[in-house]
Amino acid sequence: MKCKRADVNKDSAEDFDSLLSWLDPDRERAGEKYVTIRQQLIKMFTWRRASDPEGLADETITRVTRRVTDIRDSYEGDPSLYFYGVGRKLLFEERRRLSRLQSEPRPDEIASEIDRDEGFVSSYTTA
């Protein structure tokens, strides 16, 4: 197991290096672009009233980082636009997930409804 975990960390570091080199060949400028993109993602998620803007920004970056080796050679244009596209899709996923959670009854609501039904039924059977 430890070897597998080390491989994952190694792969993640390589993917992150690939991400930075995709943003800019100069590592210093790549780091600046990375910070700017993250800040802009946080602003976008905040403006759209996301529940966790920083967490969604980090998840967006994680998803792009995982895909960068597949897209870097074929993607044309400003890489930051790719991040914003992934972020918009992630926000849609988050809203859909929250919508589903809100439409499902909570366990305590189900329990109180069962108690009410049992009380209702027992009032007819005891009369």
Image (cartoon, grey):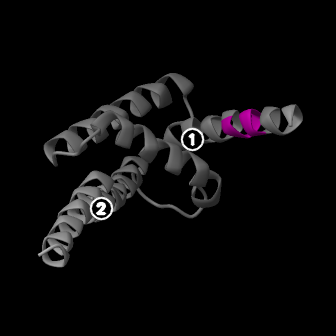
* 60 in relation to 42, above or below: below
The foreground one among 55 and 102 is: 102
Q: Which residues are magenta?
A: 8-12
Direction from residue 93 to residue 95 in the image, left or right: left
Examine the structure image and report whether residue 10 is included in the region drawn in magenta.
yes
Q: Residue at x 28, y 52 (%)?
A: 108
Find residue 79 and report its horizontal and vertical position in percent.
43, 49
Q: Is residue 95 visible?
A: no
Helix, strand or loop at disc 1? helix
**Main SS of residues in magenta:** helix
Nearer the viewer's eye, disc 1 or disc 2? 2
- Residue 121 placement (x, y as % from top left): 19, 74
117, above or below 98, in the image: below
- Find disc 1 in the rendering and name its residue: 19
Q: Amino acid at mark 1?
A: Leu
Q: Which residue is mark 2?
A: 92
Q: Which of the two labelled residues, at mark 1 and mark 2, occupies the earlier sequence position? A: 1
In which image quadrant can residue 13 be found?
top right
Relative depth, front residue between 120 and 86: 120
Residue found at x 78% / y 35% = 5
Q: Tell me the element at label 2.
A: helix
Q: Amino acid at mark 2?
A: Phe
- For this view, does 42 lie left or right of residue 82? left
